Image (cartoon, helix red, strand yellow):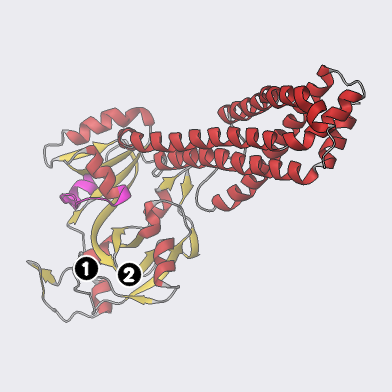
Amino acid sequence: MIFRLTYKSIFNRKTTFLLSVFSIAISVFLLLGIERMVKSANTHFLNTINETDMIVGASNGSLDILLNLIFHIGDGLSEIEYSSYEKISHFDEVAWSVPLAIGDSFEGFDVVSTNSDFFKYYKYSSKKLLAFESGGNFEGFYDLILGANVAKKLNLKLGDKAYLSHGSSKHIHKNRAFKVSGILKKSATPNDDLVFMQLVTDEAIHMEWQSGHFIDMYISNEELSYMHIIPKHISGILLGLKNKIQILGMQEKINHDKEENLKAVIPAKALSKLYKLMENFQDVLLLISSMVFVGAIFTMLSSMFATLGEKRREIAILRSLGASVRVIFTLFAMESFLIVLGGIVLGNILLSIGLFFANHFLSVNYLPDLQEVLMLFVMIIIAVVASIIPAISSYQYSLQDGLMVKS
């Protein structure tokens, strides 16, 4: 009988009921959406570089090396000898190594000089490799690989010619035409805003730069590509070790190298340190999430009180027919429960649709965690408990208000 009465009551005010459900759904969508995106962004940030055991640079601070080589933020690092890279690469503990040099630019985007191993070993997020939207790894001497944002903003495609700028200056290497050979898929990492070239090519095109001035040696592009060129300096090294338990020992070995003042950084530790510096920002996001949660509760309560006037006459009729206090309170509780439950279900459907599109940029979890389940459970409990207030009010005044003949 209670279920039938609840159904009839809701059907009588279906427009108000649906609007209440929709308002709760929007609140749930915002609440869970902020929670999921913040958590996913945190996880993604901490996994900007994954499966790389060590980053080696000149003896700057750990954060300087991390920010410069991985996030491409801040002033440039001191250069290290390429011979140091070769020496470290041959250590017994090293499984793979990738050199990085940062210097030139292209239309405002940083150019990173490396080799084909970068795209074989650099991983992010859940051990993902950088994937190609079109084209592939380095093949030709003058090949360029573009990050997703670079290609999109500059409207470049495979085979297009490009001319790099010397450092951050306006001087362009006009005598060295590069070709776009690969375009990366969007990864939501700093690599989206980078341009990649081969390290040997970087060294070659700067042969004509001496003491900060360009001197044309009239070497053709073809001749330059056949010259035996060995890089002299790089900005840093990415390392993968054969055994994870060797990390601390390897770090000590590099840090105490007598030939060059180097610093080995463990990415996970440096990222954790950087993450702590961002805790204030995280607190702001948590505050926003809490405000959305409180807003969802008040939206739910306002929806319940908005229907009070419509229910008074209905309750008065039920009272005149002998409905008990328990029946009246149960009707309010049932309706509140269904409003919130409907809002939660609809909100999660909307959220799933939103997350489907967000997954192109961040790896977001579709399933709620324990904290989110508890939030939703609290909403339901508050809705049921709060229904007591309008139930009492309606019960006390329904006869005099609801059955009063109005002129």
Of 366 and 3, the residue lying toward us: 3
Magenta segment range?
70-88
Q: Is residue 63 visible?
A: yes
Alpha carbons under labels 2 and 1: distance apart:
10 Å
| Residue plotted at (48% across, 60% down) | 132
In this figure, what is the number of numbered marks? 2
Residue 6, image x, y percentages:
84, 32
Is residue 27 or residue 181 the one in the foreground? 27
Q: Is 148 part of what is drawn in magenta?
A: no
Q: In the image, is 8 to the left or to the right of 74?
A: right
- Indicate whether residue 73 is drawn in magenta: yes
Q: Secondary structure at mark 2?
A: loop
What amino acid does circle 2 point to? Phe
Dot 1 crowding, Cα within 10 Å, few <14, some 14–19, many 20+? some
Could you tell me which quadrant the C terminus lies in?
A: top right
Find numbered disc 1 in the image and state the secondary structure of the residue it sits on.
helix
Relative vertical location of residue 358 with respect to residue 212 in this rendering, above or below = above
Residue sitting at x 35%, y 34%: 279
Q: Are marks 2 and 1 in contact (CB under 8 Å)?
A: yes
| Residue 88 in sight from this viewpoint | no
Q: Earlier in the sequence, mark 2 or mark 1?
A: 2
Q: Amino acid at mark 1?
A: Ala
| Up-down relation of residue 220 to residue 46 (above or below) | below
What residue did someone put label 2 on?
141
Taking the spot 20% from the left edge, 68% from the top edge, the residue there is 166
Compared to residue 241, the image places residue 212 above or below, namely below
* Disc 1 target residue: 204
